[in-house]
Image (cartoon, rainbow, N blue to C red):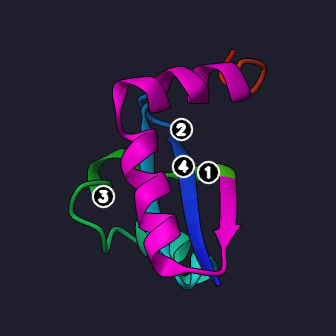
Amino acid sequence: MHYVYIIYSETNGKLYKGSSSDLKRRILEHNHGKVASTKAWLPWRIIYYEAFANKTDALVEELFLKSGKGKERIKYLLKNTLK
């Protein structure tokens, strides 16, 4: 399986979108400061993920979530989570 995920920084309220074939390991890497782009804003909490059977499909979804329309969709899907 391949996962697309969104994590939330407890420090600054920012979102990070990514993908991985091992979601648990990847979240641990984020929270142990092993990811350069997220280590300054620990801790991170997973707020959303999707599972895909195909890696290419997961990467396409990750890119979409990082786009303008994808950000709109995130606001709609997670409106109560992001209050």
Residue at 35 percent of width and 34 percent of height: 67
Graded by Cα atoms within 10 Å as few (under 14), some (14 to 19) or many (20 or more), the crowding at tag 4 reads: many
Question: Mark 1 and 4 residues: CB-CB less than 8 Å, in contact?
Answer: yes
Residue at 67 percent of width and 57 percent of height: 49
Residue 77 visible in the snapshot: yes
Q: Nearer the viewer, mark 1 or mark 4?
A: 4
Q: Nearer the viewer, mark 1 or mark 2?
A: 1
Q: Secondary structure at mark 3?
A: helix
Please identify the quarter of the rendering in which residue 76 is found.
Answer: top right
On the image, numbered disc 3 is attached to which residue? 39
Q: Nearer the viewer, mark 4 or mark 3?
A: 4
Q: Secondary structure at mark 4?
A: strand
On the image, numbered disc 4 is attached to which residue? 7
Sequence-earlier tag: 2 or 3? 2
76 drawn magenta = yes
Residue at 65 percent of width and 81 percent of height: 53
- Mark 3: which amino acid? Lys
Question: Mark 1 and 2 residues: CB-CB less than 8 Å, in contact?
Answer: yes
On the image, numbered disc 2 is attached to which residue? 10
Which of the numbered marks, if any, corresponds to residue 18? none
Q: Nearer the viewer, mark 2 or mark 4?
A: 4
Please identify the quarter of the rendering in which residue 56 is found.
Answer: bottom left
